[in-house]
Image (tube, coloured by chain):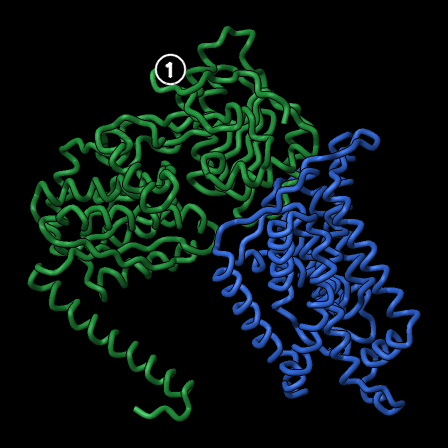
Chain colours: A green, B blue
Amino acid sequence: MKVKTPYRVAGLAMASCMALTACMSSGSDSGSAEDGDGPIKIGISLPLTGDFSEPGKGVQRGYEAWADYVNENGGLLGRDVELTILDDQSNADRVAADYEKLINQDGVDLVFGPFSTRLVVPAAQVAQDYGFLFVEPAGAAEEVFTQGFDNLFYAAPAVADDHYNYLADAIEALPEDQRPKTAAYAAMDDPFAMGTAYGLKDRLEEMGVETVVDEVYPPNTTDFGSIAAKIADSEADVVVGGTQYQDAVNMIVALQQLDYQPKMAAFSTAPTNPEFPEAIGSKTEGILSPTGYTPEADFPTNQEFVDYYTEKNGTPPAEDEANAWTTGQVVAAAVEAVECASPDPECQSQLIDWLRENEVDTVVGPLTWDAEGRPEGAHLIQQYVDGEIRIVLPEEAKEADLIIEKPAW
Amino acid sequence: MSLLLQSLVLGVLLGGLYALLAAGLTLYFGVMRVVMIAHSAFLILAAYLAWWFSTETGLDPLLSLVLTVPLFFGMGVFMQRVLISRLRPATLTMMSVLLTFSIALVIEGMLGFAFSGTQRRIRLDYGGANFEVFGANVAVVKLIAFALAAVSLAALFLLMKKTQFGQALRATIQHPEAARLIGINTDRVAGYGFGLGLATAAVGGTALALDSTFYPSLHWHWIGPLMAIIVVGGLGSIPGAAIAAMVLGMGQSLLQIPLGTTWAQTFFYIALFATLMVRPQGFFGGRLAQRF
């Protein structure tokens, strides 16, 4: 072809290539769905932008690593797995439409869940309507399990309300006069974030720890000065943040600016994020956080996961990546056991029934579920000790001793 | 009592920041009836540039202002001359919403592409530093942001009142046809006015970046409250916007004590509705806004 106006022609060529590829791929898609030979297609929607973009991308890395690992090791039922990941922009309406599209138009064989309760509930509803198995990596709040879903399984060790159980046990074990007297709670208006904080609140109140501040703020809150002022004014012994990421960072800085020095500070999600010490600087010492995962755990498949992931991404996996990988492991275990992976309702219901009855070995430990899909385990408690985040509870898994009295930040 | 005082201090500091962030927005409307949805996107852009500057060079993010203020001024003039001045005067206000909405989307997309959706924060050695005044803690970074607001708004005020350009700009705001009749090149003045508005976004974004986490889509959280401020203050009036920002910032901060965060945030919108019902031209807009 003679090129006279290079840009125009190149643009035209590119557009026609794209159109052609689109036609070709949609053509081959419909073929494979019918004969069950081609790759196993897995549909996923994730919050890659918006409020949950940070953890959403972690989940994406975990899913992609899992798919590559499976494909390098003979695939699933001898077939490759192929992920279709859509971006729901952290939007609950969008996530339902995404799964609707994945199941109806793209004809995926299986679906994996999105990140966090707010998106899991609408997504699980769509999966339920189509009779799909729905294993999810990050919807831990109680409301996920009270919607009457019979297709849902949470692929992590514990639900939100139980995240701080080991910490509550440790506080309870302290002599009466060493226990904290007062506690302040600030939680994002989000079922998961509130679940973690209020799970601990219930336990502490049972022990007689007085609640002096109980704040709930909307997810779009940008200014944490006033919340911090309330907490600082209460001079609570313990501060508990039901947080995601940016809210924890902004709140901690706002508390430091007011010179508030609690004896114990616990925040969900954010402290386990590698960006966290980057943002807070050297003032992380003593901050507590529950976590469902650590690369050091000696569960059977974990070492292989950590090595594979680290080689692929250059850094060891964090909790979000691990929960995504766990989701893959759980679904794969069911698929291998009942030997089917198709959108056919019978196959999906076999997968669901199998998971109800069986235990699955995963990188976060062996998992079993109750009738509503709650995992029946507990979370580890991590703390920043000497500038590194380490497991401090429970006793048998600890990497460092729990610092009871938090140093000044 | 100390909580009240503390909240008052925080409210004043917050109000100052709001005033700075809203100043440009009211200027665009005053000069050329443009509703600039992309203003908060430019704030976030400036925040990213400050972050990028300080991570690349290791210097204080405030120094990035030396580069971003002229850059944003230039972008503003360019945007007005190339894009906004091409809109038909009859439908200018409405079409400017669409045009600047698309600009906001482009900025958000480019930020996501260049810096990813990861939440960023500038790590400052003095990020948690504070001092005590009468029992209330004042954070150094918040004070710096407040000082930036005070200096920029004062400079803007002096520019508008004392210079010939300011007179020309005010004449353009008050009556474009009459301004043209006495020989003011209103097109050029409007371009500079727009550039000035965007220059305040450079300062505002940098002030914002000192004390908060930001990510590409954050600007949607800001545009609503900022619009509320300029409507309450009277569209086109910079002192009005500053006073409204102060009142709303303090109100939000103080209402948080009895009502909690969720309801305190609705204060902006309640103020907006109340203004539209009682005094739709805003409290300081006067004649200008009545024409709208």
- Left or right side of B77 for A302: left
Q: Where, quadrant-wise, is the C terminus of chain B in this rendering?
A: bottom right
| Residue at 40% from the left image edge and 53% from the top image edge | A47
Image quarter for residue A231?
top right
Image quarter for residue A353?
top left
Residue closer to the observer: B143 or B291: B143
Residue A13 screen position, x and y as percent? 32, 83
Query: Is B68 above or below relative to A314?
Result: below
Residue closer to the observer: A347 or A279: A279
| Residue at 53% from the left image edge and 58% from the top image edge | B217
Residue closer to the observer: A37 or B182: A37
Q: Chain of mark 1?
A: A
Q: Is residue A285 visible?
A: yes
As drawn, the residue found furthest toward the right would be B162
- Left or right side of B17 for B169: right
Q: Where, quadrant-wise, is the N terminus of chain B in this rendering?
A: top right
- Left or right side of A268 for A228: right
